[in-house]
Amino acid sequence: MGKWMVAAKRADFDAIARKYQISPVLARIIRNRDVVEDADINRFLNGTRADLYAPKLLKDMDKAVGLLLRKIAEGKHIRIIGDYDIDGICATYILYRGLTECGAHVDTAIPHRIHDGYGLNEHLIQEAYDAGTDTVLTCDNGIAAYDQIAYANALGMTVIVTDHHEVPYNEIDGKRQYRVPEASAVVDPKQEDCEYPFSEICGAVVAYKLVLALLAEREQTEWQKVMESELGLELLEFAAFATIGDVMELRDENRIIVKSGLALMAHTRNIGLRALIQAAGIDAAHIRAYTIGFVLGPCLNATGRLDTAVKALELFQATDTDQAAMLAGDLKAMNDSRKELTRKGVDAAVAQIESSERQQDRVLVVYLPEVHESLAGIIAGRIREKYGKPAFVLTRAEEGVKGSGRSIEAFHMYDELTKCKELFTKYGGHKLAAGLSLAEENVDELRRRLNENCQLKDEDFEEKVLIDVPMPMAYANFDLVAELERLEPFGNGNPKPQFAQKNVRFLSGRVLGANHNVGKYTVADEDGRRYELIYFGDIERFHGYVSEKYGAGALERLYHPRAGETSGAQQVELSVVYYPDVNEYRGNVSLQMVMKYYQ
């Protein structure tokens, strides 16, 4: 079950605890998240919207705002060109609402995943030009559209780029020469000379900052006042939604945006978002980052995958509750069918890997011509999880082959693709995810080159389980659970804290859930104190582990102890990584331990 390591980061935990009136346990967990300086600890625990960074710290922000205000005043046609994923849809909505508020003559275009592919292409520019567009405003794309922006310039159009992706570069004599497109303004915190304090924001947050700056300039007020307006708060919800959906790290400014946005979503100002929450059967009062990442977000992504993301944008723009309910129902149904197609795709990918020598590859490249190209990224993510290796899933597209990759921490996907970029007709991405297009005859060569160039060592593939505090379950109580809530929202960059205890005896158990995939157990520590423990992981694998270590009889006795006997199962004794949680069932509230890993 991976390599278990106790986080050994040092600090004066008692002093931190006293200063911020928290427990030393909480102080240790915060230090493990690399939050060290006083100002950062204070912002982590007590940060509010007042601590967000000023939009004008983004390079070219003043230029973009000035240009847009001039174009709006002149009545010029502005077209927002977004992207078909969660971040792109939310960014497009944010810009559309902001520009509409300014009285702009504005419309939107979201590329079709299959017909257009990711980002700007020449025919999107041509379509905008033919529609009489004067200014193209990109969001969540544009930083890599060097040639397409040159084409727009040649047609006499103005282009403003807002993006958050890596700036493309050529490596010459070991030095990186960055290629920033020649747009009239480029707002992207990843630019080398951008002095924005935190570059890991998503495209929708860049768009949100632009709208705050735009409205502040137009109304001659502070951007903070715009942020606290009805519109500012609604748009913050979408910035938060996209931050989670695009799997940004929930630290620094992102943490405040998400924490604040989730609180606002409980009473969302947006009719469409409210309809989506209802369609998914979610209690709006208990929306967590998990809810966005795994329930609501995939409904948005499904439209861009199986149909057109325009439907998701229409949902957020809806002004009528009946129309919103119908659109939300469509999105949910589409996501349900996407789940089934994904399952089949994952099965096909696993079969291909396990029936060939690919199992030995350090970088997995799977070609599934018949799989819907929009599912490649999800399937690649599942393959990466299963094998713990970087994974690319390629499918047949209208022109050649398209694919998506999902990576592990030690493999910088964008940099590795750049090493063999002559194989691609198009590629882009960042450290942990990428997209690419190439000719079919280059598929085997891509697999060969990625593996040839690969510098990964054996230890890079081993899952590392980081334990925050080795802590007996006896220390876990309702007060600790309540205190741990101060660390929320949990997600990428701020995982749920993990505790560990040795010699946990499993006394009895039962399997729950519609799919019989949840284990619930009574366990005891070395002093005989008993606890309820629940496991949501791979139950079949757990059963296999117990049977192999203690024999099938032990597993049988665990679930079916003989009358008056719990000792039969006591031989199942494991070390457990867990976190404490509260179980509410039919009005009863009890403490339970959630098992994450065992050995």
Image (tube, rainbow, N blue to C red):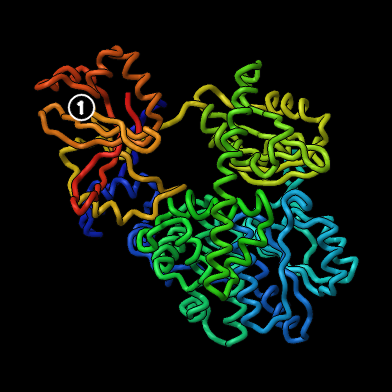
Q: Quadrant of the image for the C terminus?
A: top left
Residue 169 in percent (x, y) is at: 74, 47
Residue 193 in percent (x, y) is at: 65, 60
Quarter of image, res 252: bottom left
Asked whether the viewer can see residue 120, the reply is yes
Q: Residue at x 71, y 64 (%)?
A: 138
Quarter of image, res 136: bottom right
Residue 185 in percent (x, y) is at: 73, 68
How many numbered discs, if any?
A: 1
Which of 178 and 400 lies nearest the eye of the viewer?
Answer: 400
State the residue position of label 1: 508
Q: Residue extending furthest right?
A: 154
The three-letter amino acid code for the residue at tag 1 is Ser
Q: Is residue 190 left or right of residue 17?
A: right
Asked whether the viewer can see residue 185, the reply is no
Quarter of image, res 405: top right
Which of 17 and 326 lies nearest the eye of the viewer?
Answer: 326
Dot 1: element: strand
Q: Residue at x 59, y 41 (%)?
A: 378
Q: Is residue 514 left or right of residue 274?
A: left
Residue 119 in percent (x, y) is at: 73, 55
Q: Residue at x 60, y 52 (%)?
A: 301
Q: Residues within 10 Å of mark 1 (few under 14, many from 20)?
A: many
Which of 182 and 380 lies nearest the eye of the viewer?
Answer: 380
In the image, residue 378 sits, relative to residue 363, either above or below, namely: below
Q: Is residue 160 left or right of residue 465?
A: right
Q: Residue at x 34, y 47 (%)?
A: 31
Q: Quadrant of the image for the N terminus?
A: top left
